[in-house]
Amino acid sequence: MSAPSPLSVPPHRPAEGTLRTAAVVYNPTKVDIEALRAAVTAEAETAGWGEPTWFETSVDDVGQGVTAEALASGVDLILAAGGDGTVRAVVEGVRGTTVPVALLPSGTGNLLARNLDLTLNDLEHSVRTAFTGEDRRVDLGVIDIEREDRSRTRHVFVVMAGMGMDAKMIENTDDDLKKKAGWVAYLGAIIRSLRDPDELHLRFRRDDERPQRATVHTVILGNCGSLPSNILLMPDAVVDDGLLDLLLMRPGGALGWIRVWWKVAWTNGIVRRTAAGRALAGERRNDGDLHYETTTRFTARLSRPEQIELDGDAFGEATAFHAWVEPGALRVRVPAAEA
């Protein structure tokens, strides 16, 4: 067997004679529970693990609470079965522990699994990876959100946090249509969001630099940059580089939006995905439409309350936020290295 990479570590081994145990945190609206139980039970038995325990999410507890219950029972692994919201909630629950998370993708986005090049539509393979794989350490984004009443809440994000057009798009998306049509449901929301003339007026600070002011359509902090439909929003974002990638977007009129779409969908999404394409495209340069930076800490205050999203879920309105990266803070189960 080849040695694990520096960012991959062998799974935890319990004391001799003690069976390892796994907990499954699942969203009942996103999974086929009978197929899931059959696959997990069979793989756990084959791998010599104890009987899995099961925790169902709900509207009142989307994952953090049941994840805490699972951790309190002393499990060695948590399997997150659901969409991006379930994954984000489970990760929020395991933050500060060394218990790894295995992803059983479901739903329309599967953003973290997509960025880790994990299997998206093969339940048996995903479950087998959970019990036989190794742990890859990836960065975790943490954000304190301040509301209009000055109250604050702390959350995590594994893919990206955003304000502006992306948050409005998510807020404008019909949930029922999204369930039926997947990412096609966002098309109408994109059109409605583009018609919104409001811009973000913010005062921000990146790391220890001097505060700056900006007027933009969108501000996004990304831990990784790939979205469905071959969209590579942040081409230089890496899940384990100890950095957050910052994108400030301010297209100038209809032509500006066309330029943005060309850069994101074609140049980033197609051309830059290969070494030859990157050489052909040349060095990426900032311009008036798209401006990229990296940071480890980012603070922003808005002139008025604005919609904010985390990993594709709407999180209401915020007047300010402070975000930072916790390098290597999350362990995600990935396929074991092959000989």
Image (cartoon, rainbow, N blue to C red):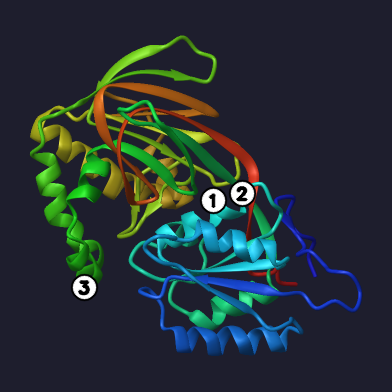
Q: Amino acid at mark 3?
A: Lys
Label 2: which secondary element: loop
- Residue under pointer 2: 95
Which residue is at 49% across, 49% downward? 158
Q: Contact, CB < 8 Å: mark 2 with mark 1?
A: yes
**Residue 89 image position (x, y, % from top left):** 48, 55
Tell me: 205 left or right of 334: left
Which residue is at 55% across, 29% downward? 296
Q: Residue 50 sits in which quadrant? A: bottom right
Disc 2/disc 1 C-alpha distance (Å): 5 Å
From the image, which quarter does the N terminus lie in?
bottom right
Label 1: which secondary element: helix
Which residue is most to the right?
Answer: 16
Chain-order first, disc 3 or disc 2 = 2
Which residue is most to the top?
Answer: 210
- Residue under pointer 3: 180
Tell us which disc is closer to us: 3 or 2. 2
